[in-house]
Image (tube, rainbow, N blue to C red):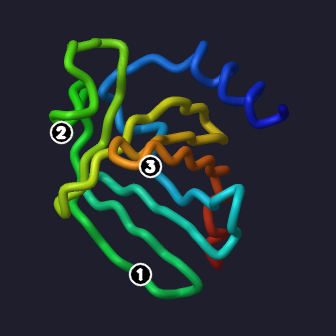
Amino acid sequence: MKILIILITLASIHKCSGNNLLTKGTWTSEEDELYVVKFTKDKFYEIYNGDTSVYKYSRSSKSSDENYLKKANVNLDFFSLEDGRCFEISGLTDSTLAYRHTVSGRMQIFHKSPPAKKNR
């Protein structure tokens, strides 16, 4: 029930802006703390227990998965990886990210990790 409330709240405040500023940073999976994703300007990092894979990504209001939606909806927000995977961002705030894999429908929820402290 808690997850459903979070998703409804995120969906109601999320707007597709095409702006990558909110996604930039490191995000830890709510389901598995060993799974972390990181967004930079044009790279998406998948990190699991220290093993890292890096992909170029793009963000759009259209799904790169042609079978996902038949009608265009400008209020949706997607990111696509160079390996062909596509995800719908269903919720995004400065501290929470929720996205759905367009093929499997699997929803993943992440919480933003605080920036690493720099040594003075």
Instruction: In the rendered view, tell whether residue 54 sits above or below residue 111.
Output: below
- Report the amino acid beneath label 3: Lys
What percent of the width, then of the height, locates residue 105?
45, 42
Q: Are marks 3 and 2 in contact (CB under 8 Å)?
A: no
Residue position for label 1: 52
* Residue 111 placement, left or right of 99: right
Looking at the image, do the residues carrying marks 1 and 3 touch, with CB atoms under 8 Å apart? no
| Residue visible at 40% across and 56% down in the picture | 39
- The answer to whether 69 is drawn above or below residue 120 in the figure is above
Q: Give the label on residue 24, or none.
A: 3
Q: Quadrant of residue 87?
A: top left
Q: Nearer the viewer, residue 114 or 48?
A: 48
* Crowd tier of the residue under label 1, counting other residues whose Cα lies within 10 Å: few below 14, some 14–19, many 20 or above: few
Give the vertical position of 53 relative to 100 (above or below). Answer: below
Report how far apart the C-alphas of labels 3 and 2 lie in the structure: 21 Å
Q: Is residue 82 left or right of residue 106?
A: left
Distance from disc 2 to disc 1, alpha carbons, whole Å, reads 24 Å
Q: Nearer the viewer, residue 52 or 83?
A: 83
Please tell me which residue is depicted at 84% across the width and 32% down the height of the picture: 1
Upstream in the sequence, badge 1 or badge 3? 3
Amino acid type assigned to the residue bearing label 2 in the image: Ser
**47 vs 100: above or below:** below
Q: Nearer the viewer, mark 1 or mark 3?
A: 1
Q: Secondary structure at mark 2?
A: loop
Residue at the disc numbered 2: 64
Q: Position of residue 62 (x, y in %)?
A: 21, 27
